[in-house]
Image (spheres, rainbow, N blue to C red):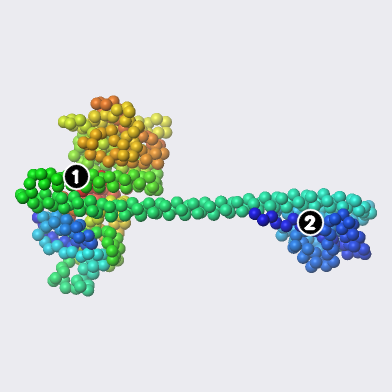
Amino acid sequence: MISRQSVLVVEDDEDDFFLTERVLRRCTTGPIFHVENGRAAVDYLAGEGTYADRAQFPMPDVVLLDLKMDQMNGHEVLATLRVAPPTPLPRIFVLTGSNEPRDRELVKSSGVAAGYVVKPLSVAHLASIFENPSG
Amino acid sequence: MAQEAQADVVLIVAPIGADAANIHAVLQRARLEPKICRTTPELEAGMAGECGAILLTEEALTGELRLVLARFFASQPAWSDIPVVLIASAGVPNSGSTVAAKLRGSRRTITLLERPLRAVTLVTTLDTLLAARHRQYEIRDLLNERDALLSSLETRVAERTAELQRMVEEMEAFSYSVSHDLRSPLRSLAGYAEALQEDYADTLPEEARAYCERIVRAARRMDNLTQDVLAYTRVTQCEMEITAVELDSLVQEVVEQYPALVSSADSIRIHQPLGCVKGHVPSLIQCFSNLLGNAVKFVAEGVTPHVEVRSTVEKTRRRIWVKDNGVGIAPADQARIFRMFERAAGRKVPGTGIGLAIVKKAVERMGGAVGVNSTPGCGAEFWIELESASPPCTSVAQARNLASFWAGSPAGPVPLTAAL
């Protein structure tokens, strides 16, 4: 089933973004936005700075958030969103190469993420992510 | 270590007449080190500078002097018991003998000499007392040595602890960076090779598609290897919080959540109750996923896997058995397969040769043992044995909690041998 949800991908690795976007294109007809670090992700979700124009940079339905990035990593993004959650809060899924229990626990304890996916992103992952737009 | 001074000075307090001068002369002739203290401050200075003995005549024992002495004795370290010689007049129950009697209870070395005093008596008494004082100095030096040794030991222990801590942190940082950085290019390799196969399916010759398939397989194998090495370092290094663990739900979770097992879930039969053991939940999950993964993997071609999990108790230990109908393991290989990178199966069956090493290491760190019984061709029965525990067991909820959080991802909790 093809979704129409919009997605913001927070990813600093070019190859990972290419492969993630490729899978996303198969699963959603909605727009796909891309920022390359955590700082930009926070600005985007807050609608600040470069991303002030909501017509050009609308609030996405889903955020796929990488963990290991320069200029604010994924954990720091989650911590920031926990203190100042944007409205409406998109569903945020961590998409990371890390399978470390420590990362999972940190993400879980942030209370902001809806799920944790170990790369590479698959069609099956997305079917589940797009399944429940209200949750 | 430098030895402290061995003071032999004999302090003389004798206020009346020529007593002090006479005693001084006698001691000097005997090659001792007498020092006359005419005032209380002089005595205090002499005592503060360490001395071998104190010699008093009874007339010296004023209230003030007694106070000074009492204060001095109280300030002495435990090893020090300065000998005191009190010279009193014979026959009369005088103040000197009264004081001596009083001091008897104070556990101090008091020697009472009566007049008329002979030089030889005084000198031999002081010789004896100074010899005793030397024993005290020896004790002092031993105590100092002991303290120095203890404090250097403490320093060394602290240094070692800091060093170990640093090594563990380095190891963790290494694992973390392996997890992130080494795996990333592998993902790209497999990802692009798959993209080639899919996007150019029509134009790629059959042979090129097969090459792509090989690239994907090799990258996947490399990824499994790095993940297994990481899992191994984790069970080697991590702190293991040992709790009472209820195995029924834990094993059930493993069977239901791990992708490698989901397709074979029907062929795994769990003979409940498996009971409770003392263990570390994440390590137990790791062990059972590895054992069950092996059990369904190593079957002869065309054979449907059939796995049974049961549990037995012997005294305080509980043994959990995982029996399969696989190809079995030759006796010569049975010890070998628990070592790193050792495999009994040929190259055809995928595997890293680390899974059982992880199980062995994890179980041993939980205070248990592992083993296998097998006849080639007739399946294998692996067992792990741990300290038995009695309910209530709280840790199952943790496992559940973990599972529900990953429910958003269709693959469930990604096992350590996640597919690329």
Q: Amino acid at mark 1?
A: Arg
Residue B62 visible to the viewer: no
Seen in the picture, residue B373 relative to A89 is either above or below; the reply is above
Instruction: Residue at 62%, 53% (x, y): give it.
Output: B147
Q: Position of residue B238 (x, y in %)?
A: 38, 48
B218 and B21: which is toward the camera:
B218
Quadrant position of residue A49: bottom left
Counting residues from the start of the chain, the first of labels 1 and 2 encountered is 2
Helix, strand or loop under label 2: loop
Q: Chain of mark 1?
A: B
Seen in the picture, residue B176 relative to B363 is either above or below; the reply is below
Q: Amino acid at mark 2?
A: Asp
Checking the image for residue B217, the label placed there is: 1
Q: Are marks 1 and 2 on the same chain?
A: yes
Identify the residue at the far left of this view: B202
Residue B87 in the figure: left or right of residue B67: right
Q: The N terminus of chain B lies in which quarter of the figure?
A: bottom right
Quadrant position of residue A97: bottom left
Instruction: Residue at 27%, 41% (x, y): give it.
Output: B352
B373 and B322: which is toward the camera:
B373
Seen in the picture, residue B256 relative to B156 is either above or below; the reply is above
Q: Position of residue B257 (x, y in %)?
A: 24, 44
Residue B32 in the figure: left or right of residue A10: right
Checking the image for residue B8, the label placed there is: 2
Q: Chain of mark 2?
A: B
Marks 1 & 2, CB-CB < 8 Å contact: no
Per the model, the C-alpha gap separating discs 1 and 2 is 87 Å
Seen in the picture, residue B245 relative to B103 is either above or below; the reply is above
